Image (cartoon, rainbow, N blue to C red):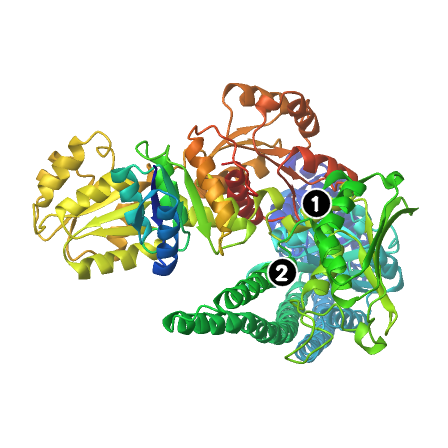
Amino acid sequence: MTSELEGHQTSAPSAATFSNVVRGHAQTLTAELHQALRETMFDNRFEVRPALFGRVAAAEVATLLAFLDQEAQGNAEQHGRDLCRSGFGEEGVLRMGQALRRFCITVLPEELRIPALAEVERYHSGIVRGFTAERKAVILEEQERIRSAIQRTNHRFAIQMEVAADIARAATSILDLSELLQTAVDLIRGRFDLYYVGIFLADDLHRWATLQANAGEPGQVLLRRGHRLKIGGDSLVGWSVAHGEARIALDVAGTALSFDRPLLDDIHSEMVVPLISRNKVVGAMAVQSRRVGAFTDHDVPVYRIIADQLANAIENARLYERVRQELLERERAAEELRRAKEAAEGASRAKSAFLAAMSHELRTPLTAILGYAELIQRAVGQKQYDNVSADLTQVLVAGKHLLSLINEVLDFSKIEAEKMHAASENFAVSSLVDAVASTVRPLIEQNSNQFEVDCPPEVGLMLSDPTRIRQVLVNLLGNAAKFTNHGKVRLSVRREHSADTNWFIFEVADTGIGIAADKIQGLFQPFSQLDDRPERLYGGTGLGLALSQRLCQLLGGTIEVESELGRGSTFTVRLPDLPASARSNGLERGREAGEPGPHNSSFVGTTASQVGDALILIIDDDAAVCDLVDRYLRPAGFTTVVAATADEGLRLAQDLLPELVLLDIRLPDRDGWQVLAELKSDPLLADIPVIMMTIMEDRQLSYQLGATDYLVKPVDSAQLLASVRRATGHNLPAQRNRILLAEDDLPTAAILCRELEAAGWRVEHVVDGEAVLRTLSTQPPDLLLLDLLLPRTDGLAVIAALEEQRELRVPTIVLTSLSLSEEERARLAGSVELILQKGRNTLDDLLAQLSRVLGAQN
Amino acid sequence: MSKILIVEDDPSIREVLTRLLKGSGHVVISAADGARGVGLARQEQPDLILMDLGLPILNGWQATHRIKSSPATAHIPVIVLTAYALTEDKERSFAVGCDDFETKPLDIPRLLGKINACLGLRDPQIEHNPDG
């Protein structure tokens, strides 16, 4: 290339010549400059794209030519400014100068080199000047921008801090959660000039974040709708709560995470900050703006501070709410306690009054009995027998009175304790009336009264409890007889039908002394005899009418009285045919209150502790040890019998066949080893476990002779109980404890199995009705726990099948989540022992009822 | 002539019953607590047992339960005599195997009737009447 140049350029050196040479080698120069720029690739101040280098190099050549042509001397400087503006660094500018110089030296003929270099120097210094000047301007501008940015940030930061402080203040002063959240969102939205602020709280299971408070009109609709977002779902809120991190979407439309904003369509930026309190994400705060890119990473820390304040405030408010609830609960409990106490005191006052009256009523005939007995004793001592027979009659009369009093009190207290249950049977009313009439006729006629009975045969059959009705009628007729002289007593029966019920109306009317209007009120109160004087004319317990009234109520009816002093009284008893539903309702009510129904009355519970429990025979001559052991064992439900000698022990063992023998080795007559050997050689007694008690270590011998366990005195209570329980455990009559559980919901079944097994039952679990029927026929359990909703053959079908095949029936408890109608309940109640409602009845209810239901069958 | 065991802790009632039954021509033995009662039942093999409920050591229910669950005494009829007059007490008594039930104060003629019924019909299959 050089030789070629030499051939063309031989004229005198000048700028024009130089310019011509450059023009001739423009391509070469451009390439050189391009190469120089590429070498600076990694040193540029800004990222000037390499694609632009070619254009810059060409522009450089054009500028140089214009400079050399003297057309625009100032172009160099301007070009320097442009380079600076377009993002070139010093390196690029310097490299391009070097490239120009190298071009002069290598390409130009020798005579042109010096002047050309001078031109290039002039040109390049122009560029450098322009570049430097521009660079200064740029730096100044940047500084200015930074300053204002810092100012803006400071301002924003100040606002954010202020908001944080305000929220902190609000958090300490507002304890109501919703009020607090509303205050916070309003504050944040107003201060930061946001479009929307919303606070979401996570639910307990951490599955949903629900909008709790928001600022901005569209949000109100969301709030009303109960807007919630799935935690861990696609929403920013869901993501943020799941990850516990803040998240910014600079342009909501463009972000990969879809923002659920049916009503908030004007949003461009969104930031979500998690609310974290004590390392737990309790929710998230979402802030939204209409501007694109409204939130930057710099905002996160500040919003975090606010979020932390909020999270703590939320926790505090929740805590406060809990405490408040607890306080309320406690107040409620205290109130209930107070009411219960008042009720108990009321009841206790009533009871005391009743007892006082009772005591009086009991003492009166007893006094007569004792008094006459005294008289008789004296008379017999003096051998004067004239009055003895009459006195004995008085004793008998008073005794009988006392007995009737006790019977009535007993009935009365049974009704009061709701322990009396009405039987229900069909009977002919006329035969009941006949029986009553023949009982009371002598009593009525004794006072020269006429007795009329009006019971037409069409009254027919009644479904109720005839014993109780008889009791009421005898009492009313007895009263009528007592208070009527030379008059008339009339018993009439009729029947009425109203409101789907058959009513039987029994009327007892007399023409006796009557009752004063002011006495009628208290007539049915216990011990309210008309005549309160001690030497009253008319006997009676004072409980008759009170009892009659309660019996009528028990039978679903009423008793009323009309009376006129001196003219007589009429008592009207209205009793219904006892409908089946009323009876089963009564049953249900009793059971729900934890009371046994009529056919599994409370004796079952006590039988277990008083009869079924193990009897333990203690053979030990040391009374102190016996006493101690007894005191350890009795509270645990064991009954003990003590023998002080070996002979007595053996005899008692044969007599009582105890469940366990506790045997001392040193006995006064024979040693314990002999007793043990004798016990073990009697076939009737050999199976009774024996625990040896001694001060010596003879474990080996004990076991060889067949002892079950060995305790060294002094015996410790826990050790003794453990050993006794172990020994008697397999002997208890508790082989009947297998439960068949039919439940298709496996988690429920798992819980039931666990709890039942923990309570000592053996549980077999099946999931459908077919399996229930199969198991019932092959390995009948002691009890069936039946869910109603089972696949294929459901619980109702199982019950129906068992109605058909009654031999397969075992005690059955229905466990259901269905809410049954009264009718369904009544129908089921006839076929199963108990219905428990899932959700309403607890596991404890079930466990408590199990042994009752089973016990009732034993 | 039958042998009757009275298990009763109240001495006067024991006395009244003893005299009453001796007067009716029976041999009477008695125990004052449940454990002794069970023992006498086994050793003496009475023809009938009259059992109180509120007894020391073993109560009447427990004693009856023992008597009725031991092969040596299960066949002996037991009539419970008690001042516990509640239905539950009666049901409990039948639950442990007593053959009949009478409440105190005693209706002497009715009790004697029941005793005769029990002695006459020793078959355990007899159907007892709970209401007396």
Residue A118 can be seen, yes or no: yes
Secondary element under disc 2, as helix, strand or loop, is helix
Residue toward you, A439 or A830: A439
Q: CA distance from mark 1 to mark 2?
A: 73 Å
User: How many neighbours does mark 1 have within 10 angstroms: few (below 14), some (14-19), or many (20 or more)?
Assistant: some
- Which mark, by number, is residue A408? 2
- Compared with B30, A705 (above or below) is above
- Compared with A141, A16 (above or below) is above
Name which residue lies at 10% across and 48% down. Answer: A665
Residue A20 can be seen, yes or no: no
Question: Left or right of A157: which side holds B55?
Answer: left
- Which mark, by number, is residue A233? 1
Figure label count: 2
**Mark 1 vs 2, N-terminal side:** 1
Residue toward you, B79 or B117: B117
Amino acid type shown at disc 1: Gly
